[in-house]
Image (cartoon, rainbow, N blue to C red):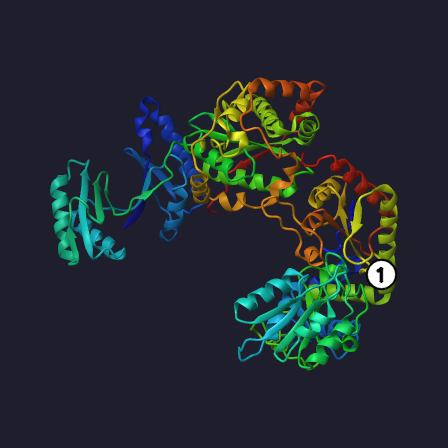
Amino acid sequence: MIYLDNSATTQVMAPVVEAMCRAMKDSFYNPSSLYAPAVEVEQALTAARERIAHSLGSRALRVLYTSGGTESNNMAIVGALPRDGRPAHLVTTAMEHPSVLACMQRLETQGHRVTYLPVDAQGQVEREALSQAVGEDTVLVSIMQVNNETGAVQDLEALGRIIHGRNPRTLFHVDGVQGYLRLPVSMPRLGVDLYSLSGHKIHGPKGVGALVMRDGVRLTPLLVGGGQQQEARPGTENVPGILGLDAAVSIFETQGEEFAFHMRGCKAAFLETLETALDGWQVNGPSPETAAPHILNLSLDGVRGEVVLHALEEEGVYVATGSACSSKKRNASHALLAHGLSPERALSSIRISFSPMTQRQDMPQAAEILAHAVQRLRRFRRK
Amino acid sequence: MKRVLLIRYGEIHLKGLNRPYFERAVLHAIEEVTRGVEGIHTYRGQGRFYLEGYPETMEPQVIQAVCKVFGVHSVSPALCLEKDLDVIAEAAAEMMRERGYVQGTFKADSRRSDKQFPLNSMQLNEELGYRLLEAIPGLSVDIHTPQWTVYCEIREEAYLYVDKIPGAGGMPSGTGGKALLLLSGGIDSPVAGWMLGKRGSAVDAIYFDSPPHTSARARQKVVDLAQIVADWTGRVRLHIVPFTQVQELLYDKGPEDMLTLLMRRAMMRIAERVARRTGCQALATGESLGQVASQTMEAIACTEDGVGMPVLRPLICFDKNDTIEVARKIGTFETSILPYEDCCTVFVPKHPLTKPQLPVVRAAEEAVYAEGGETLLEEAMKGIQVMELTRRPAFG
């Protein structure tokens, strides 16, 4: 089995499993309880918060644990609305993850105004459009750090400068689910006010994530309850999940650069074989070198991405396609269309995504399998 | 006061000497769908069944489950009472009040099979009507078109009820032969299977799987649909045929405008062999006349050509809307419209023949199968996987 769908989720690393088992066996106390062992659990959560804050550039950042990327994004966006209920303006891009886009669309039905910024073929947000979009009543701009389909990386510093130059009160939210720990981030330096991250994209567990906030940012909570996390996100903390996330973060802390180098190497090795083994394909979005280290999006002429996916599956190679195959509803990926791809090319795309656990020596074989599958399937065109 | 469910089975009455056989089948199904309800038991009355002993709070779910049994004509939640006019009349008034039937017209409809009871049916109607009028001032009697009918049956005990809830109708499952349904994952075929099941046929199903052109989810969808049909019929055995190689052979060697026809003929051939091997007496499809090119009269004739058993097409005269209506009612629609099935579009001709000529189709098929085609069909047969789907319990 060669697993190349690491943007969907990653395999949990062994130290993470161990940390979680320990948490479930030994640290089962409710962190809000008053006796000493419970306080110890609470301290462990605090230490994990500090590690996450540090990984994003400052121990002064505030870390709220959530159930994952979707909740973090929702909390940032909905929580930023004016408390008095007056209509607000928000800005995002056309290629965001559905947990941002669907949230924005719901706000539109509630009377808020949303601007969807275009991106270019490399997946770069158009800065002029951003500058024009942000105004007096803009409460939040939400832009993803790394696009989950093409790996396009934003220059957050430049975007942050534009946003805050136009309106210092506008919050800059970054969906960092695909970027966290794969690329270095310093929230204070980049001018990022809110940052979403998820455990299972970095070899941690599913069902846990965080929304990291610049000190002083105040959001309206989505949930009300028993007052945990200073009432900003009540609910008994997911202790095993958080300690698993913490273990994953600590691994990246020491090996993050090495990991990025490894993933770039895997991508290069894959492409090197593919170049000789197959004709008629293109890289979508940014060039493989400028894209995030773990993501590669290809269009394969004359085949459907989903059919290729299933053919690879038969050979034990797992990849993704952002564009599910259906003749009734041509649901080409919105993100690829936003990058300016034609629907036909979007439907012929697959996403290959690497991880630190990907075996570099498997890459030539995986590329060969892809080449072979595409050649076999190209025979079948609609007559 | 004891509550019972009175269950009527319609058409089985007609079945003469076979009647006990049909009765046993429907009783068995009723017992099966109510299994797991604490204290419930069934007993037989004249031309009906009774269910009793279930917790009162579960009555609505029990009714719902029983109404899904083929062969059940209608169900009435009833009170089982002492054969005493005062008791009956008081309970009748209470029953009307409970349901809010206090302003409008009614009639009493009694039946006395216990001739020891002092009043005959007519007298009981009059007496019951009179007492209800006394008890609930907003009621008046209308013999011809009443809003509500208060039924009272004097048998071993007195049974009193107002509601008649229609059941699934039809004939008990498994009493009408066995058909093999060509199940595709679309809207039509599960409805066709359900309709045959409703007429008493046992239904097995066959699905043609073409990975990588179709996905594991498309296949799961078919399994889910077969399961929903099994929830009605009690049991569906699903045969999954690996069809990719046949599909690709047809693509490579068949004339473009006949691809769908040749594919359907291949499916029919395999299905017939599976049917014979598993004791099915007919094939069944969801075809509807003229719906698509492969379902014109000519195309159907070409598809059926060479099949040595009946091919049943319950939907042949259904409009799509009619089919969708049934699909919604039986709970297959939401699953059928999931989008996964359509990666096969490369195998669909752009301009299919709508009036194919049988000799031409036969000749084309012969050419396709000339080298090794028969072996591919055999291979596909060998690779069949079988799944047994049985009714999911509603209780326990």
Residue A195 seen in the figure: no
Q: Horizontal and vertical percent for residue A311?
A: 73, 40
Q: Is residue B324 visible?
A: yes
Q: Residue at x 81, y 65 (%)?
A: A183
Rendered image quadrant of residue A137: bottom right
Q: Judge from the rendering whether residue B369 lies leftward or rightward of residue A359; answer left or right.
A: left
Q: Is residue A270 above or below residue B21?
A: below
Percent across and percent down for residue A123 are: 75, 61
B89 left or right of A101?
left
Q: Position of residue A341 (x, y in %)?
A: 71, 53
| Chain containing mark 1 | A
User: Element type at marker 1?
Assistant: helix
Q: Is residue A374 left or right of residue B206?
A: right
Instruction: Identify whether B274 is placed above or below A325.
Output: above
Residue in the picture at 66% in, 56% down: A334
Residue B180: x %, y % from top left: 52, 28
In the figure, B6 relative to A240: above or below?
above
The crowd level at tag 1 (other Cα within 10 Å; few <14, some 14-19, many 20+) is: many
| In this rendering, position of residue A156 left or right of residue A233 | right
Q: Nearer the viewer, residue B225 or B252?
A: B252
Give the mark count.
Answer: 1
- For label 1, the residue is A260
Q: Residue at x 73, y 56 (%)?
A: A149
Three-letter code for the amino acid on which mark 1 is drawn: Ala
Q: Nearer the viewer, residue A286 or B102?
A: A286
Which residue is nearer to you in this view: B153 or A84?
Answer: A84
- Residue at 14% across / 43% down in the picture? B124
Res. B385 image quadrant: top right
